[in-house]
Amino acid sequence: MSRFSVSLFLALTAGVQLQAEAPSAEQMAKGQQVYMQVCFACHQPTGLGLPNMFPSLASSDWVAAPKPDRLIRMVLHGLTGPIKVNGQPFNTPAPLMPAQGLTLNDEQIAAVLTYVRNSFGNQAPAVAADQVKAIREAEKARTAMWTEAELEKIPVK
Ligand code: HEC
C-alpha cells in the first residue's frame, strides 16, 4: 500500500470507530430519562453520589472502563460491597446496589450506561443494546448480586 492509501485507510477506520462509539442525542435523552427514574435517587442528579453513602459516578474508574462489561453486569444483577472506586475503598453502611435486570430492558440499560459514561464530565464509548443482550444471555443462570472480586475477573480492555 502507498503511504497515501495507508493514511486514507487509517482515517476511514478511525472515522468508523468514532461513529460507532459516539453517543447519539436520542440515546443520551433516553438514558437521562432512565437515570432520573432509577439511578438519581442514590447517585444524585449530579452523578456525584453522597459521601459515605452512595459513590460518585463522576471520574470513576468503573464508569470510564473501555468496555462496559462490568457495568452491564452490575446493573443487570446488582452489586454488593465492599468496593473500591479509583483504588480507594468506598465506605457506606449500605454497600448494596439493587439489580435492574427485571425492570429495565436491553435498550434502557444501554442508554442509561451511555448517559452515565458521557455525563458528569465523563467521556467513554457508548453502549449498544446488543452488548447488553449478549451479557444478559451469557449470565442468564445468575441470580446473585456481583461482588468486586467477581467483576474484576471480567476483562474491560
Ligand atoms: C438504591 C441505591 C442505588 C441505586 C438505585 C443505584 N445505585 Fe449504583 N451504587 C449504589 C451503591 C451503594 C454502590 C456501591 C455498592 C457497593 O459498595 O457494593 C453503587 C455502585 C455503583 C457503581 C460503581 C461505583 C462507582 O462509583 O462507579 C456504578 C457504576 C453504579 N452504581 C451505577 C448505577 C447506575 C447506572 C444506576 C441506575 C441504573 C444505579 N447505579 C442505581 C447505590 C445505588
Image (tube, grey):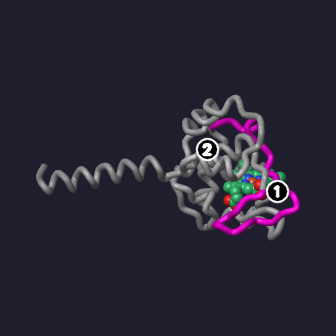
Question: Closer to the camera, 113 or 69?
Answer: 69
Residue at the limit of the structure toward the left, as seen here: 2
SS type, badge 2: helix
Q: Is residue 100 magenta?
A: yes
Is residue 15 within the magenta segment? Answer: no
x, y (%) of residue 44?
Answer: 77, 62
Q: Earlier in the sequence, mark 1 or mark 2?
A: 1
Q: Which residue is mark 2?
A: 110
Residue in the image at 88% along x and 61% along y:
93
Expressed as whole percent of the image width and height from the top left, the position of residue 39 reads 76, 53
- The secondary structure that dominates the magenta segment is loop
Per the image, the residue denoted by label 1 is: 95
Q: Amino acid at mark 2?
A: Ala
- The magenta-colored residue range is 82-106
Which residue lies at the image location 75% right of the left edge and 49% below the top edge? 79
SS for dot 1: loop
**Nearer-the-camera pick, 16 or 66:** 66
Query: Distance between the Cα atoms at labels 1 and 2?
Result: 24 Å
Residue 30 is situated, as x and y percent measured from the top left of the image, at 65, 47
Q: Residues within 10 Å of mark 2 (few under 14, many from 20)?
A: many
Q: Is residue 37 visible?
A: no
Q: Pointer 1: residues within 10 angstroms few (<14), some, or many (20+)?
A: some
Residue at 60%, 36% in the rendered image:
135
Asked whether mark 1 and ligand 1 are closer than 8 Å, the reply comes as: yes
Residue 93, placed above or below residue 135 = below
> Where 106 sits versus 82, above or below?
above
Q: Amino acid at mark 1?
A: Pro
